[in-house]
Image (spheres, rainbow, N blue to C red):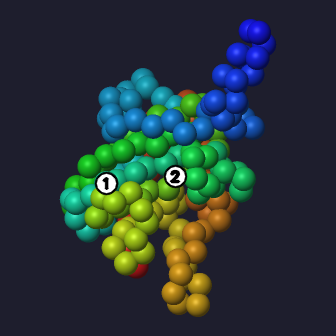
Amino acid sequence: MSAGLALAAALAVPVAAQGYVYGRSMNNDLGQCAAGKGPAVRITVTGLKSSSGNLFVRAYPATKADWLVSKRYVMRVDARPQAGSMTVCVPLPAEGAFAIAVQHDANGNRKTDISTDGAGMSNNPGIKKILGLVPQAPSVDKARFTAGPGVTRMTISMQYL
């Protein structure tokens, strides 16, 4: 009986190949990026068009199998956007290769609206349009970075179509 319960518990929490737990989330806590903390990423998000809606910052393992796949992030930080720029702290489960995606859900409907929402990624790769219409996300290779044991700092510039 206990083996069945252990299996059910294991299936309830998806785990990445590296042993990471998928789908964790929290509110923005800059204290997680204080001196002596980590691993974490302190991100300055620039180019936010407004303070309306929601800001979602997701950290993914830097693999093609996980990148931008629904619920395959290892941490999602939810924050209230601030027009212009703001700082977000994303705690990471370990040192290693990750990729960050930032989404400004400008109208707060928790859906991607191409005409109003903004996006940005680690290393600031451009977001191309297919046939000039549909946005295409860059590959994980363009967004990959290595997080060390402490706090990694980066700036991500938002892009609006």
Q: CA distance from mark 1 to mark 2?
A: 16 Å
Q: Residue furthest top?
A: 2
> Which residue is labeled 1 in the image?
54
Along the horizontal axis of the image, is 112 left or right of 105?
Answer: right
Measured along the vertical axis of the image, is residue 3 above or below residue 74?
above
* Residue at point 59%, 57% (across, down): 68
**Helix, strand or loop for disc 2:** strand
Q: For this rendering, which residue is in front, 67 or 108?
A: 108
Residue at 44% in and 56% down: 102
User: Do we see residue 156 in this rendering?
Assistant: no
Which element is circle 1 on? Answer: strand
Q: Amino acid at mark 1?
A: Asn
Q: Quadrant of residue 4?
A: top right
Q: Amino acid at mark 2?
A: Ile
Q: Pointer 1 and pointer 2: residues touching (CB < 8 Å)?
A: no
Q: Residue at x 58, y 53 (%)?
A: 70
* Residue 37 image-quadrant placement: top left
Q: Which mark is residue 66?
A: none
The reply to whether residue 44 is in sight is: yes
Which of marks 2 and 1 precedes in the sequence? 1
Q: Which mark is residue 100?
A: 2
Percent x, y of residue 120:
45, 63
Q: Is residue 145 above or below residue 24?
A: below
Above or below — where is 122 with respect to 98? below
| Residue 17 image position (x, y, % from top left) | 75, 37
Image location of residue 63, percent across then percent down: 70, 51
